[in-house]
Amino acid sequence: AELNEAVGLRDRKWDSLAKDYCLKLVKMREEIVQRGSLCSWLQCAFDEIRFKWKAAEEKEKLKIEHHQRMRKARAQARLEVISRERQRRLLQACMLSLQEETVEG
């Protein structure tokens, strides 16, 4: 009788342990799935933030390049105006000296 009780007690303990172990496995699997989905969502959120940051950075870089090109073009145009003005004054001086030679000659 004692042996049957001891065996029954041992079987109940093993059954309880097996049941707890199975419940723990199920909870762990659920937690892994939840963490996986959370990590996936977090990764997507960070990817979106990183994408927006890189897009803003690229936009700023393009804006700076555009301004540099505009300033360069404006400086080149100014140099061309200065060059034309010099040529015009040189031609005026040549014409004036030619007119003076003609008048004196």
Image (cartoon, rainbow, N blue to C red):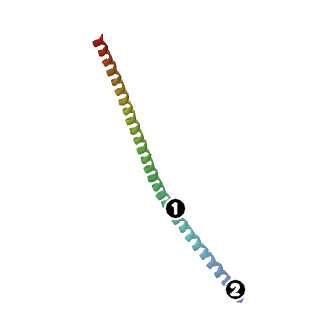
- Which residue lies under the disc numbered 1? 39
The structure residue drawn at horizontal position 44% and vertical position 49%, both measured from the top left corner, is 55
Label 2: which residue?
A: 6
Looking at the image, the residue that sits furthest to the top is 105
Residue closer to the observer: 81 or 21: 81
Residue drawn at x 59%, y 70% as measured from the top left: 25
The residue nearer to you, when weighing 61 against 67, is 67
Q: Residues within 10 Å of mark 2 (few under 14, many from 20)?
A: few
Q: Residue furthest front?
A: 104
| Furthest residue in direction left, as rendered | 103
Q: Secondary structure at mark 1?
A: helix
**On the rendered image, what quadrant is the C terminus found in?**
top left
Residue drawn 45% across the image and 53% down it: 53
Which residue appears at 39% of the width and 33% of the height?
76
Q: Is residue 42 left or right of residue 16?
A: left
Q: Amino acid at mark 1?
A: Cys
Neighbor class of circle 1 (other Cα within 10 Å; few <14, some 14-19, many 20+) is few
Q: Position of residue 26 (x, y in %)?
A: 56, 70
Is 90 situated above or below 32? above
Across and down, in percent, residue 33 comes to 53, 64
Q: Position of residue 71 (x, y in %)?
A: 39, 39
Q: Is residue 48 toward the left or the right of residue 102 in the image?
A: right
Amino acid found under the numbered disc labelled 2: Ala
Q: Secondary structure at mark 2?
A: helix
Q: Are marks 1 and 2 in contact (CB under 8 Å)?
A: no
Mark 1 vs mark 2, foreground winner is: 1
Query: Quadrant location of residue 64?
Result: top left
**Nearer to me, 71 or 105:** 105
**Mark number for residue 56?**
none
Q: CA distance from mark 1 to mark 2?
A: 48 Å
Residue extending farthest to the bottom is: 1
